[in-house]
Image (spheres, rainbow, N blue to C red):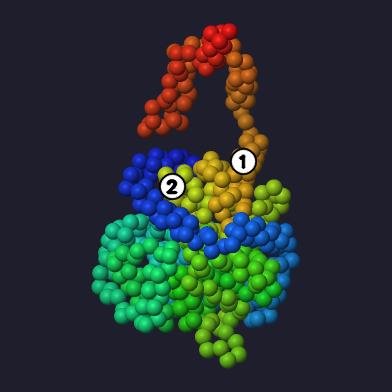
Amino acid sequence: MPNTKEEQFRKACEVSALDAQGNRILHEHLENYRQAFQNLAPRFQNLENAKKKAHLIKWKAIENMDRYLLDFETNFTRAGGKVIWANNASEALEELDKLLATYQPSHIATNHAMIHEEIGLPKYLAESKYRADEADLGRYLAQLNGTKPSHVIQPAIELSEEKAKALWDTKHPEIVPAERTEAEKAAEEEDLEDEQAAPIDAAATKILRSFRKIQRDRATSTDVMISGASHLLADTGSVVISENEGNNRLHNAFSPYHIVFAGIDKILPSIHDLDLLLPLGALHDHGQRLQRHHSLLTGPQRGRETDGPSQMVLILVDNGRSDLLALTEQRQALYWMECGASTNACAMYETIGGGAYQNTYPGPMGAVFTAHLDSEESYDYLQHAASFTNTERANPLNIDIDRLLLKNRHDRVSNAAKPLPETRAWSWYTKLAKNRKYIDFLGKGLKNILIKLFFKKSWGDQRVLPRIPDKSFSTQWRSKAKDTD
């Protein structure tokens, strides 16, 4: 039984890579995204220039994070909200526990956010005395499947429509979809007319409409809404929450208490930055022109407002982000908006799926980011769990992911304590590799034996080790040169 995360990862890779059906489903979903992206990318007059501008916006935000976070806290508090600072995941959950002990809710609603997964919120709520229901359909299907989100944007991307329908019918066989309102009919027609929208299966439509009915029934009894922020706006003190289904907004309209978790890296200087970052993010997240629902919440209900919470609390989570900020070469990882673009472009992710990574954030950007988060586990192996596929072009902020991966690998090797036998072994290997006559001195038979002895385990049971040819490249080269002469 694998013990470490790295051992679990390697074992999961062997299983996932040989899952032909799972690979086919994942490939189809990723191909749909790529096609949608290609269809909509021309809407930007100059996409590369837009990404450069977005990069500068986040550069400004991260380089001045301390000032902007204080500005946000001042403006958010002035509007009636409350900010709580948490150094790590355990502190964030402790603060949440205090708030829930005060509120004593009968029903909690949560909406999919990766910060929730990072701090362990689903596990905390499952073990608590409170009733908590997921308001995001994708996250709910992953929950029914007994898996964690395998993609930062599409939590249940590995599920086929048949599997999703089977999970739904097992849990909710009695649910009859509610009659659609005129507004919903118009929205569905707009979806079908939209050039990037893929045909919607009848089963998927039934699940979606049934889930909407469930959310409407639950919303009026929600006491606490727990959300994750997409952005924090320093100049207005606003919390930006983006979603496609609108269930977060629905529950938030009825619940008297709203708790939001956000990493300190979500800060933006101004509300005016959204006119670029929202459509750019939607294009790279889902291949959409714009996500359907964006809420800008500036504190709790006040004045003559008739909906929204009476109390709103934002828990700002550090969890290693300040340490990452101190690394001049690697702080660029904090620019990440948690979009799935680099993941969708990663050949390794497409082969093994998100579940194999054994961490909260799968994919190349997740590999970079996770290495710096506070954790008792070691995630160094993730630096080798992403393919180099020009990922800078595959994300909306031009983050140089390949360079960050290489830097993390370099630091891992430099900081690792090497046993004396290993040091001597690599020293001898270096001498051999630098002198061709030593390598050619060993015959092909002995070389094949050594390769099998040292690399059989790491090569895997499903692949055949390559064999050394009769003549080495250098021997063939010398022979060719001699014949030419």
Residue 160 appears in the rendering: yes
How far is the residue under mark 2 from the one under mark 1?
21 Å
Residue 23 placement (x, y as % from top left):
37, 47
Q: Quadrant of residue 79?
A: bottom right
Tag nearer the camera, 2 or 1: 2
Residue 235 placement (x, y as % from top left):
69, 73
Judged left or right of residue 373, residue 114 is: left
Judged left or right of residue 56, residue 285 is: left
Q: Type of residue at label 1?
A: Leu
Q: Residue at x 56, y 54 (%)?
A: 395
Q: Residue at x 48, y 13 (%)?
A: 471
Residue 222 placement (x, y as % from top left):
44, 79
Q: What residue did someone put label 2 on?
A: 350
Q: What residue did someone put label 1 on?
A: 406
Q: Residue at x 56, y 88 (%)?
A: 305
Report the quarter where the N terminus lies: top left
Q: Type of residue at label 2?
A: Glu
Residue nearest the viewer, comparing 284 with 231: 284
Graded by Cα atoms within 10 Å as few (under 14), some (14 to 19) or many (20 or more), the crowding at tag 2 reads: many
Q: Tell me if residue 338 comes above or below residue 269 in the rendering.
A: above
Q: Name the mark on residue 278.
A: none
Report the quarter where the C terminus lies: top right
Callout 2: SS = helix
Callout 1: SS = helix
Q: Tell me if residue 50 comes above or below residue 226 in the rendering.
A: above
Judged left or right of residue 5, residue 198 is: left
